[in-house]
């Protein structure tokens, strides 16, 4: 008649796995499995652990668990090894102490319920923290004034402003590319000196007397406060640059 260890070894080889592979699958130390297959159960472990390992190994090898446990109990009783108290919690391997590994359908064990409750609390706390962070970010985002990107303008070109009682708005439109120079007479300050491309329009705010020089009067159109203003005709001999005063 085969011993317990012989039947375990035969079932493992029939399954086509090594002792190392069986140890990885069952989470039981390989030296324990080797002793089981050598029919040596004199391990420095409580009988409760040994019975649990035997049950797991038999289940892995598709053997009758209850039969192997009964035979082990008989061998242990014959050798005088009774149950003893567990003194330590050394990590011997994964042991299933319950006689039936599966809980009744529709029910959870107290351990499962405690774990579910614990993870539920952790998940709820994490969601609460994320919600608070989102509220803080939203508060500071709404409190921070938005920054607007200034529109690029030419340094020499003043922005058109609504005219005061004593101010007028001059608008030059280039019919063809030409040059234009505008100077404030009171302080000789140059308001604009540059070229206008074809179709380009430049508004200027006039608050005093201006000296205006144009390259070609026919290439410019002038409006004062939205009304057309005719640029004077110049004598090419006396004033070749085309200057005129405007106030």
Image: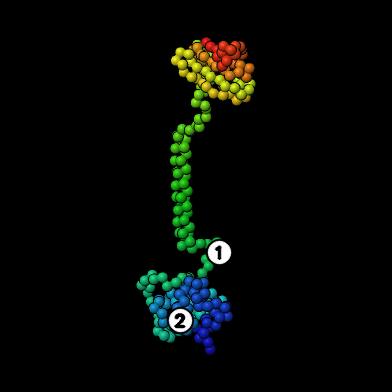
Q: Quadrant for residue 229, please give it.
A: top right
The residue to which callout 1 is attached is 105
**Neighbour class for label 2 at 10 Å: few (<14), some, many (≥20)?**
some
Does the CB distance between marks 2 and 1 fall below 8 Å?
no
Tag 2, which secondary structure?
helix
Name, please, the residue furthest toward the front. 237
Residue at left offset 46%, top offset 59%: 115
214 or 56: nearer the viewer: 214
Q: Quadrant for residue 203, please give it.
A: top right
Residue 77, numbered label? none
The residue to which callout 2 is attached is 35
Q: Position of residue 70 (x, y in %)?
A: 49, 80
Residue at left offset 63%, top offset 22%: 176
Residue at left offset 54%, top offset 65%: 104
Would residue 198 be seen by someone viewing this image from the given angle?
yes
Would residue 65 be seen by someone viewing this image from the given angle?
no
114 or 8: nearer the viewer: 8
111 or 171: nearer the viewer: 171
Foreground label between 2 and 1: 2
Tag 1, which secondary structure?
loop
Instruction: Give above or below for 196 relative to 89.
Output: above
**Neighbour class for label 1 at 10 Å: few (<14), some, many (≥20)?**
few
- Disc 2 to disc 1, C-alpha distance: 36 Å
Q: Position of residue 109 (x, y in %)?
A: 49, 63
Name, please, the residue furthest toward the bottom. 1
Q: Position of residue 181 (x, y in %)?
A: 53, 19
Name, please, the residue furthest toward the left. 87
Q: Earlier in the sequence, mark 2 or mark 1?
A: 2
147 or 166: nearer the viewer: 166
Residue at left offset 52%, top offset 74%: 21
């Amino acid at each position: 008649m085969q011993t317990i260890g012989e039947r375990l070894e035969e079932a493992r080889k029939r399954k086509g796995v090594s002792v190392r592979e069986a140890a990885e699958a069952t989470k039981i130390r390989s030296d324990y499995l080797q002793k089981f297959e050598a029919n040596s159960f004199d391990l420095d472990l409580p009988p409760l652990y040994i019975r649990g390992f035997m049950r797991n190994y038999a289940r892995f090898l598709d053997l009758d668990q209850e039969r192997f446990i009964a035979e082990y109990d008989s061998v242990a009783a014959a050798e005088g090894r009774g149950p003893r108290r567990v003194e330590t919690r050394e990590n011997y391997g994964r042991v299933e102490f319950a006689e039936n590994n599966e809980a009744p359908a529709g029910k959870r064990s107290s351990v499962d319920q405690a774990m579910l409750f614990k993870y539920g609390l952790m998940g709820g706390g994490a969601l609460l923290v994320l919600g608070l962070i989102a509220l803080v970010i939203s508060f500071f985002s709404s409190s921070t004034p938005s920054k607007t990107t200034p529109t690029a303008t030419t340094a020499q070109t003043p922005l058109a402003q609504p005219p005061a009682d004593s101010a007028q708005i001059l608008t030059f439109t280039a019919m063809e590319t030409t040059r234009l120079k505008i100077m404030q007479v009171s302080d000789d300050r140059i308001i604009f000196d540059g070229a206008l491309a074809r179709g380009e329009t430049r508004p200027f705010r006039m608050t005093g007397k201006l000296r205006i020089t144009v390259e070609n009067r026919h290439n410019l159109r002038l409006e004062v406060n939205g009304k057309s203003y005719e640029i004077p005709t110049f004598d090419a001999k006396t004033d070749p640059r085309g200057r005129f005063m405007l106030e």
